[in-house]
Amino acid sequence: MEPLYKPEGVEERWQRAWEEEGLYRAGAGARRDETFVICVPPPNVTGALHMGHALNGSLQDVLIRWHRMRGFDTLWQPGYDHAGIATQNVVEKALAREGSSRKELGRDAFVERVWHHLEETGRTIMGQFRSLGASLDYERERFTMDDAYIEAVMRFFVHLWERGWLYRANRIVNWCPFHETAISDLEVVHEEMDDALTYARYPFADGEGGITIATARPATILADVGVAVHPGDERYRESVGREVVVPFVARRVPVITDERVDPEFGTGALKITPGHDVKDFDIGRDHGLRTITVIGPDGSMNEHAGELAGLTQAEADERILGWLKERGQLERRESYRHAVGTCERCHARIEPLVSLQWWCAMEEPRKPALTALRERRVRYHPESQHAFAIRSLEEIPDWNISRQLWWGHQLPIWYCPDGHATCDWPAPDACAECGSAELERDPDVLDTWFSSALWPYATLGWPEQPPELERYYPGDVNSTAREIIRLWENRMIWSGLELMGDVPFTDVVIHSTILATDGRRMSKSLGNGVDPLELIEKHGADATRYGLLKMSSTQDVRFAEGALEEGRKLANKLWNVSRLLLQQRIEPVVRPTAVEERWILARLDATRAEIEQAWSQFEFSQSMQALYRITFDDF
Ligand SMILES: [Zn+2]
Ligand SMILES: [Zn+2]
């Protein structure tokens, strides 16, 4: 044996051997009837292993191996998410490089192209999990676009429909004008931008004077339906209840009061544009104001913009500013730096847009989940995240489940020429209301998180009832990043209670976020990320796992390579201990009598107890320290 441990070669060989011997299979080596189940959070099918995966994979593997060693029937479920917009974006970019586009290709050819792309370059992370030493049951890999999984998604949708929780309505959503789809809050990134704030005067309809408002988006003036001021704002006491005339369109609109107006912003008078602003949408609805939309799905001015129809927003801004200036209603413009929502994938400016979308009412389905969390049948760790998860359910808005994409699960909704909607699966032959056989399927696909909400039981074969489903559901632990508590964790909990009658797991570990050495979040655009595969190559998987777990003491930690070097030292020491024993052919003694032998065995027992205690509370950093101490300080 070499005096210095070289992980390269050794790790890979054993990883392969153990997998080939079937040691990672569900139930392998089980000596007791109890099960222990974790589903890996399904990574994007086009993604690559990042630091979050590496840390999360390490701690799940600790829990899985710990239970497997104690004889539990253990399942660690692998698989991938189809990641609707992310995957569609990768393929659209490839098409753009070829001078083509999704629209040019048409829907069917585009979807085929996505499958082709995935065959070529997709599904790489499970291979990278192997390099990390993760003992997943790789033979059970699932994909949210597998036929059986699609079946589960359709059945879930029809179930919600039959419960009466699905409805279609015009609501304001985050709209990406490049992708031409609604996107979730998580996919919106806020970036600081320099804009101009325009101060425009709206004259009173019944005489002298007027009110000046401030806006960063003059083009939306065309969709104004009111002006609102804070009820306590003395400056406007005389104006409330009167009408003003909206510039350019000469629309008479009321001056109203609302608590949600910030009197500190601009002049304290807010133009109300329910069609193009989230807060205005709420205010408009509560005051019974109508909604006008002047910007279309592609971000340019639509047919309701009158003579400005077809212009870009920037062009429309110029026309309106010119109009205001000519009439002396442009008071001033000043530079204005503010946070603007942009699309995470294409960086287009997000349009808050009112559009017809499918929604899942959350009032009913959240109730059993709230009870389960309050009764601690599911516990989030650390405790602060448990409180956050409860609060998220208490304040949960209805869920926008439709996306205007092509890659994903198309809604099982069909329309007849009279506009009746029929929801069924498999596809219906006739309209449920009028019997018409002329049916057209809704073109929208479901939010990606709709299918991941089913992950814990759809991966086990639901809606079929195979024996694995009964054996391995409910599972035990789920571990994830804190950003997806609302998007994923809570949804698995309520959907599991609804369809399976039980919570999908009892413990949710919200793991640390490993920040870059400069204390900022690791990101591609900042170039401050650390590639876990490079770390594995440099230090070995054991040392990498040790280092990541050692770092993960609190919710936000800075990356420190020293922890991995410590892990490497530890691996080397253990290697040398083994080398010593093997070379000297030391026979194990069953009942040692020497004082120092009995002492080290007692230390070993105490350390094992300490480590097990830490793991049972999902404290990984502490357990690594204990391991290091016994190896270096005691032995
Ligand atoms: Zn986009
Ligand atoms: Zn019909």
Image (cartoon, helix red, strand yellow):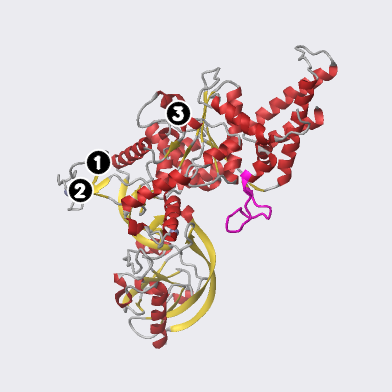
* Mark 2 neighbour density, 10 Å: few (under 14) some (14–19) many (20 or more): many
Question: Within the magenta stretch, is there residue 532?
Answer: yes
- Tell which tag, 2 or 3, sits nearer the viewer: 2
Magenta span: predominant SS is loop
For discs 3 and 1, the disc positioned in front in the rendered view: 1
**Label located before the other in sequence (2 or 1):** 1
Which of the two residues, 341 or 590, is positioned nearer the viewer here? 590
- Say whether marks 2 and 1 touch (CB < 8 Å): yes
Q: Position of residue 449 (x, y in %)?
A: 43, 45
Q: Residue at 44% across / 57% down in the picture?
A: 93
Q: CA distance from mark 2 to mark 1?
A: 10 Å
Check the image and report above or below for 170 versus 224: above
Left or right, 539 with reference to 229? right
Tell me the crowding category of disc 1: few under 14, some 14 to 19, or many 20 or more residues within 10 angstroms, Cα based.
Answer: few
Residue at label 3?
473
Picture quadrant of ligand 1: bottom left
Indicate the secondary structure of the residue bearing disc 3.
loop
In the image, the residue with mark 2 has its CB under 8 Å from the nearest atom of ligand 2 = no
Question: Could you say where residue 57 lies in the image, as x and y percent from the top left?
Answer: 58, 38
Mark 3 nearby-residue class (10 Å; few <14, some 14–19, many ≥20): many
- The residue under label 3 is which amino acid type? Tyr
Tell whether position 604 is magenta. no
* Residue furthest right in the image: 595
Magenta highlight range: 514-533
Classify residue 57 as left or right of residue 178.
Answer: right
Q: What separation in Å lies between label 2 and label 3 (alpha carbons)?
A: 38 Å
Query: Which disc is residue 439 wearing?
Result: 2
> What amino acid does circle 1 point to?
Ala
